[in-house]
Image: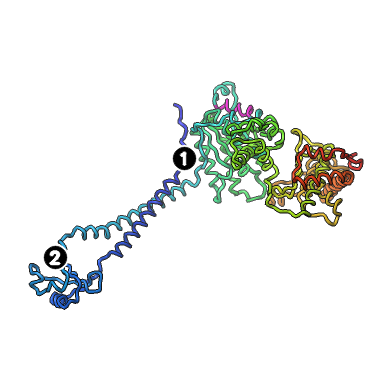
Amino acid sequence: MEKKPLRPNAKRGAGGRGYKNVGFAAFIVLVVLISWAAYHQQPTLTDIPLTQAIKQSNAGNYKKIELNGNELDITKKGDSRPTLRSTKEDGVGLKAEGLDYNKVEVTVKPPSSTGAVLGSLAINIIPVILIGGLLYFMLRSAQGQGNQALSFGKSRARLYGNEKDKATFKNVAGQAEAKQDLQEVVEFLKFPKKFAALGARIPKGVLLVGPPGTGKTMLARAVAGEAGVPFFSISGSEFVEMFVGVGASRVRDLFAKAKKNAPCIIFIDEIDAVGRRRGSGMGGGHDEREQTLNQILVEMDGFEQGQNVIVLAATNRSDVLDPALLRPGRFDRRVNIALPERADRLAILKVHYEKKPLAASVDLDALAAKTAGSSGADLANIANESAIIAARSNHSQISQADVTEAFERVAIGPERKSKVMNDKEKELTAYHEAGHAIVGHVLPDSDPIHKVTIIPRGSTGGVTWSIPPEDRSYHSIVEYKDVLARSLGGRIAEEVIYGHDKVTTGAGSDLQSAAELARDMIIKQGMGSGKLRDQVFHVEEGMMLERMVHEREYSDDTAKLIDQEVESLITEAANRARAVIKTNLKFIEALKDRLLEKETVDAEEVKAVFEGSHMPKEAALY
């Protein structure tokens, strides 16, 4: 018999909120009734003899007498309601008792006890019912909290698979190699007997590794959609709680549900939250995270044959995962999801612009060429920003200008036209950006200049934007050295124009990025010289406490040599930038004037301004 997939968990929070709302409403009604009863309660009347009532009435001291059966409710002159009460003899009229009807108003109220009975019921019985109902809902609420306490160790995974619009590989643009690797997982889930007949064992785990925003979660959803099986999704952080053992309990519950719904997929997003390497000295052996990881290891290695449950996990920090998690028998496969190439970026952009009104003049291929190094999430953000910009400008279609502005907003930040700079600051910024531009234009291995602006964008006062002409997988030493010189071009231009003592803080981020690149060249890429050539030095990239626990893998003498190599690279880059700027001062002046006039200069205009510039011999690398 075919097993029906487990229904997604109902939203229990709605019921609990309903009970709380009813109880609160009952409490409000109870308060209103009590207040009403207190306000409308019959006042206490003073009993007086009938002879005194008749005497005072005949004397003209009373305003009104209301006869209710044998009872007289008496209202004094100046009062608005009765304050006195008297009783006459049954069967004897007030006139016979000596009352002068000309001295007082006399009204007769027909005898009826219905209103009194209903009022008594309303005042005495309804509050009891409301209090009882309030207590009942309070007990139900307490019972619900008790049930929540008992379900504390239950899995919080969300179950998908019954949606109308399922994600498939058609919804994932690009990533052809990753989809090919995952297609085999789909076949395992759809046709398990075909593989079992040949003795093939279904892979228990597939690890999706890639930078943020490359579509790891979407690929996992697409695998479940292609296979047509239930899909349990949970984040690694949802296992971990303050109390030790809760995460392990949730892991057991999750895998138990998965076995009941096999064949199915369990997707653990950001598995590095619980899958970090054990024995790091953080938290000891009873750390909740380690207990959760231990339970995941046990569950993945304990599947019965024929269960057809596959664990997909995503992370961008596979280097910190525990080795036991990555061994065959647990995560048997590793699918690397890289940043998209140009053709993939074009396909992704077409997917995101498919349902948007795009003008015929928009060149998505040119946009794909300019977005080297962007992830799928970045491209989706560009498409969304362009639609927002078009709507804000009341355009009926997304124009090329809207797309360009969205690309620049995402890549280098929004323009801050509200920031006002005086003429001196504008001139300094123009010289600074012209320094970056001339060094990047002249050096042969630097990326072409795409745009130069002195309009503040993001956290910068101006931007010199370089874009590589094509995608690159590798970078050479000369390319990195040209990048270092270009980064220092702004500071050196300020120094040459205004003097060493007049340089400003505008180059702070440039100096920081140059120092980081130079250190990365030495300790990670083996691009040092002399004794450090072709050597790399491991640096722990975890949290601060983890870096403090782990001992540095090189000596103090080596650290000193690394510092000297970094200093040498920075000094060399500064000297090359200085040589280029001093040789091409007239071109810097020309671009400075153009920036002060237009504020933004594009690539073609930069080339025109720099026509005739050249690289001096002092800036060449030997």
- Please indicate whether residue 356 sits to the left or right of residue 367 in the image: left
Which of the 4 quarters of the picture holds residue 537? Answer: top right
Tell me where residue 170 appears, x and y as whole percent: 59, 28
User: In which quadrant is the C terminus drawn?
Assistant: top right
- Please indicate whether residue 264 sits to the left or right of residue 479 in the image: left
* Earlier residue among tags 1 and 2: 1
- Residue found at the very far front of the displayed protein: 597
Element class at badge 1: loop
Mark linked to residue 69: 2
- Amino acid type for the residue under numbered disc 1: Asn
Q: How is the image coloured?
A: rainbow
Can the viewer see residue 318 in this picture?
Answer: no
Q: Which residues are magenta?
A: 179-189
Q: Nearer the viewer, residue 311 or 12?
A: 12
- Amino acid type for the residue under numbered disc 2: Gly
Element class at badge 2: loop
User: In which quadrant is the N terminus drawn?
Assistant: top left
Tell me where residue 381 appears, x and y as whole percent: 63, 39
Q: Nearer the viewer, residue 398 or 476?
A: 398
Tell me where residue 516 appears, x and y as whole percent: 77, 46
Q: Is residue 580 magenta?
A: no
> How many badges with numbers are in the image?
2
Q: Which residue is mark 1?
A: 9
Real-space Cα distance between discs 1 and 2? 67 Å
